[in-house]
Each structure stands twice: as structure tokens, then as C-alpha cells.
Image (cartoon, rainbow, N blue to C red):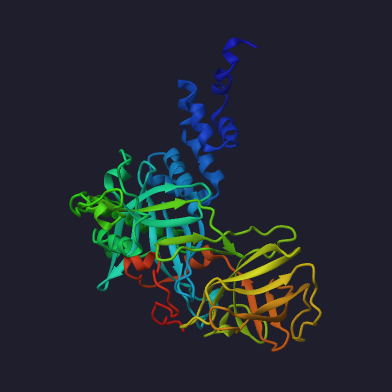
């Protein structure tokens, strides 16, 4: 083979389409490394075709959406930079307060990702299948022109919607904790931090006060930036293009507000007072310097009680719910929604005014048996009846139900499992359990029936992204409470929704 067809010359001789196919089989980091090997390859791997394939491989948004998003950034490489950075944030995040449920679903917006809290609610007159799911915005991470990020906390004060600018500091690839913190601005810029006091050792009251003080840097959201957060579900191409135009304008407004508003918050000198420095505890005074909000996603070895993560008290932290993808022998894993009733019913008109439960089903080996565990992550009640994170039922996947399915009007179940379900026990915090059976119906519904009382919990699989895109946004809470409600509470902090 001639020397001019060896090494990089061979790759450079390939058509762009073939080169894109080759580079699409390696991760973005390797594509960047390939571009560093020589000037010619750097020119080729910087092409939009190569980085469009990388963006598509990440699978976060449809291919057609990538084409639309490209209009707002300098290149597909910049877009890929943003997508790689926010990819670990996608999914379901929870907190134990309030006990009725605190579920934040992070999903693609428009050149952004949006943290959407599912409001505890009953099922409206149109049902969940045809009616809106109620949600509120918690935070948003917007893609800048160069692919870097702008973090915006959402909140509402004195009858106005505000955004509170900050920084997305760091995102671990396998993060399971999402922390809202305050850091000195020069620390966020990457300068020397060796002498700085970290946020985490602060007392919870000091941390909360510091977050509240920093959140005074804010801007009122104009109507043009407060209409839609992501493209609604439409079949009409004309109205879809109108939605894209509105979303492009909204993004530019948010970025302008971000750059205009984000100035150092001067809290004073960094002097921490006198006394013995060796014995001096971490106090709020150590933070008296220009600071800003920051969002940090980190990985910790936190424990679990069955599928529910162990949580720290008094800190602004959301915890990621591990979502096991459905697979052979674990085909029922994932998110389900449901309600109580006698006959099995989908979340449609006939379930009007019933409480909406969000249940995460996972699998776990316990005492030598493989079990299916249904964990409550949201309860659509005004007052919580079960602790957040309760196991609603557990069934042995190798133990068929001994009882027959009691509803003659329904098709015969295609599968069944024996187990037990949650009941009142020794007070709110320590519920008990009673025997029951889980039945799988041909239409995809799961029905858990208590053996003694014939109470029935019916579940159907949910697609939260789909429901939120045609959902209805309600008012947010004040900013720091809007991220994590800090105190134990048993009531729904949101007003009674109009759909119930």
C-alpha cells in the first residue's frame, strides 16, 4: 500500500458519510482524541456530520429535534457538549418531604433540560389518558451558543414568577444526588479553592439562610418566557413550527436575563472573626464574600431501604430513583400509575376524583427469593396516608397466586404472583402488611388484591415525558422550598387543583 494511503491519510480519503459512520461507533471523548492526532483529522472530525451522529447516538431527543436545536448553537459539536454534560441528570429524582410525595422528572425542554415536579393530585374529569397531568417547574439548564450551560432555579414570590441564575458546577457520570448549594463566584470560575470553606459542612440553618440570601439575585419572568417549556404534542406541522419559534424566542430571553442578572452577591468580608482557629467551627461567616447558586450532581455510596434511597436531614438534595429497564424475567420494572377501586380501571374518565399514585416497581433478592417491590413515590392526597417511599406491595415472582381473579367481567389474567400489601400498623411511620395477590391482565394492567378485604390497587405503565408535554403547569413554590421542601410535612403544599 502506498504511503499516502496509510495512517491518517487513509481516513482522510474516506467520504464524509463513511467517516461519520465510523466515528459514530466511538464515544465523543474518543472523537476529540482522534482530532488531536493531526491537523487534517481535526478538520474532518469537526464537521457537523460527525457530531450530528454523536448527538443522535446519545438518544436523548429525536433526530428531527436535533436539526431544530442546531439553529440555536454554533455547531453540532457544541450541542453534543451540552447533551453529554446533562445526560446523567435525566430521569426521576425524589425526596422524602413532603410525605405525599416529591417527584422531580428531569427531561429535555428546548435546547435545555427542565426539572418538572409532579404535583400530588387526584385524577381529573378527563382522566389521565385524555386530561392534563399537573406539574410545576423546579429548575432549568439552558444550552448556550457554545454548548456551555446556564442554570436557572425557578420559584414564585409575591405573585410573580422568578428565575434565580446560578451555575451547573459538576456532573458525575453515575450521579445519584442532586445538590443545590452556594459557592464563592471565583471558586465557580475554577480558580484556587484550597483556602475556601465548602458548603456541605455548614449547619443546616446556616445553609438554608445562605441559600435564601443568594436567591435574592433574581429576575421576573416575562410572559414571553413563561408560556411553554417544551414542544407540545401536535399533529399539525404549521402549529409545530409556531411552537418552535416561540421556544427559540423564550430561550434567547432566558439567556439574556441570565447574563444580565448574574452578578456577584456581596455578602461582606471573608474574615471569620477571632478566637482559636483550630477549634473554630464552620459558620456562616466563612462565606461572607461574593457567592452564587450552584447545582452539583455527585455520586455517593448511600444506602437503600428496599428501593428507597437513604436521605440526609435538612439539606437541599434530590435523590435519583434507580430505574431498571424492563427485560426478560423483569418485564414489569419501571414507573406505574394507579389508584384504588374495586374493578380494574385505567386512569381514564371513570377514575375521576380518585387519588393518583405513582409507583416504582423494581426487583430484589430477599431471603433467597426474588421479589417484585412496588415503592410509592407520590400519593395524590391532601394528607399522606403512607410514608413517602413505602413499599405498597411485595410479591414473590416464583410463587403463583393461590386465589382466583375475582372479577368475572374481566379477561382471565395472563400471570399472577403471591405476596403481601401495606396496611395500617403501629402508627403512621410503621405500617403493617396483609396477604394479597398480584394479577397481570391481557391489556397490560397490574392489579393487586388484598386477600382479606378484596381491596384492589390497579396500575398501568406511564410515560412521564409524554404526559408532561401535554400537561398543565401550575405555580411554583418559593425558590428554595421549590427545590426541596426542607421540613417534614404530611400535607400537600400545593393548593387543591382545579381539575378535581
Left/right placement of residue 78 relative to residue 280 reads right
From the viewer's side, name the closer residue of 203 and 374.
Answer: 203
Q: Is residue 242 visible?
A: no
Above/below status of 296 relative to 358: above
Total numbered circles:
0
Where is residue 350? Give x, y as percent: 59, 85
Write down the quadrant of residue 226 in the picture.
bottom left
Where is residue 478? Give x, y as percent: 32, 69
Residue drawn where x is 47% and y is 21% of the image: 40
Above/below status of 121 relative to 324: below
Left/right placement of residue 386 relative to residue 406 reads left
Q: Residue furthest bottom?
A: 453
Where is residue 62? Give x, y as percent: 53, 51
Q: Is residue 412 visible?
A: yes
Above/below status of 291 relative to 410: above
From the viewer's side, name the closer residue of 440 and 293.
Answer: 293
Left/right placement of residue 213 relative to residue 133 reads left
Amino acid at each position: 500500500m502506498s504511503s499516502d494511503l496509510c495512517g491518517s491519510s487513509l481516513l482522510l480519503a474516506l467520504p464524509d458519510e463513511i467517516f461519520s459512520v465510523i466515528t459514530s461507533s466511538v464515544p465523543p471523548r474518543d472523537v476529540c482524541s482522534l482530532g488531536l492526532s493531526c491537523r487534517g483529522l481535526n478538520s474532518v472530525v469537526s464537521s457537523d456530520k460527525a457530531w450530528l451522529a454523536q448527538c443522535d447516538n446519545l438518544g436523548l431527543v429525536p433526530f428531527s429535534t436535533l436539526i431544530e436545536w442546531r439553529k440555536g448553537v454554533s455547531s453540532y459539536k457544541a450541542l453534543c457538549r451540552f447533551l453529554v454534560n446533562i445526560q446523567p441528570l435525566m430521569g426521576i429524582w425524589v425526596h422524602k418531604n413532603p410525605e405525599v410525595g416529591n417527584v422531580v422528572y428531569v427531561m429535555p425542554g428546548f435546547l435545555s433540560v427542565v426539572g418538572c415536579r409532579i404535583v400530588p393530585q387526584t385524577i381529573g374529569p378527563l382522566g389521565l389518558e385524555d386530561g392534563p397531568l399537573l406539574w410545576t417547574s423546579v429548575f432549568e439548564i439552558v444550552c448556550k451558543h457554545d454548548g456551555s450551560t446556564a442554570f436557572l432555579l425557578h420559584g414564585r414570590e409575591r405573585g410573580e414568577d422568578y428565575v434565580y441564575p446560578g451555575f451547573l458546577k459538576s456532573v458525575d457520570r453515575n450521579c445519584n444526588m442532586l445538590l443545590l448549594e452556594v459557592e464563592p463566584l471565583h471558586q465557580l470560575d475554577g480558580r484556587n479553592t484550597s483556602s475556601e470553606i465548602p458548603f456541605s459542612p455548614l449547619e443546616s440553618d446556616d445553609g438554608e439562610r445562605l441559600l435564601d440570601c443568594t436567591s435574592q439575585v433574581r429576575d421576573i419572568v416575562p410572559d414571553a418566557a413563561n408560556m411553554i417549556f417544551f414542544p407540545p404534542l401536535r399533529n399539525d406541522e404549521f402549529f409545530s413550527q409556531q411552537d418552535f419559534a416561540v421556544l427559540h424566542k423564550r430561550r434567547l430571553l432566558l439567556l439574556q436575563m441570565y447574563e444580565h442578572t448574574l452578578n456577584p452577591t456581596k455578602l461582606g468580608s471573608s474574615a471569620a472573626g477571632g478566637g482559636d482557629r483550630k477549634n473554630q467551627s464552620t459558620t456562616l461567616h466563612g462565606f461572607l464574600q461574593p457567592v452564587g447558586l450552584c447545582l452539583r450532581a455527585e455520586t455517593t455510596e448511600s444506602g437503600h431501604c428496599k428501593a428507597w434511597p437513604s436521605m440526609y436531614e435538612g439539606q437541599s438534595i434530590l435523590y435519583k430513583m434507580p430505574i431498571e429497564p424492563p427485560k426478560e424475567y423483569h418485564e414489569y420494572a419501571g414507573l406505574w400509575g394507579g389508584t384504588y377501586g374495586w374493578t380494574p380501571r385505567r386512569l381514564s374518565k371513570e377514575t375521576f376524583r380518585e387519588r393518583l399514585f405513582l409507583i416504582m416497581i423494581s426487583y430484589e433478592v430477599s431471603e433467597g427469593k426474588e421479589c417484585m417491590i412496588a415503592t410509592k413515590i407520590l400519593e395524590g392526597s391532601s394528607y399522606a396516608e403512607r410514608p413517602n417511599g413505602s413499599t405498597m406491595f411485595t410479591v414473590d415472582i416464583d410463587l403463583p397466586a393461590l386465589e382466583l381473579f375475582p372479577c368475572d367481567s374481566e379477561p382471565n389474567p395472563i400471570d399472577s404472583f403471591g405476596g403481601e400489601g401495606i396496611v395500617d400498623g403501629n402508627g403512621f411511620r410503621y405500617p403493617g402488611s396483609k396477604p394479597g395477590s398480584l394479577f397481570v391482565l391481557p391489556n397490560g394492567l397490574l392489579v393487586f388484591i388484598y386477600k382479606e378485604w378484596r381491596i384492589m390497587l390497579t396500575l398501568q405503565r406511564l410515560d412521564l415525558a409524554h404526559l408532561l408535554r401535554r400537561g398543565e403547569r401550575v405555580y411554583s413554590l418559593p425558590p428554595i422550598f421549590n427545590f426541596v421542601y426542607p421540613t417534614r410535612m404530611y400535607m400537600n403544599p400545593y393548593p387543591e387543583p382545579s381539575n378535581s
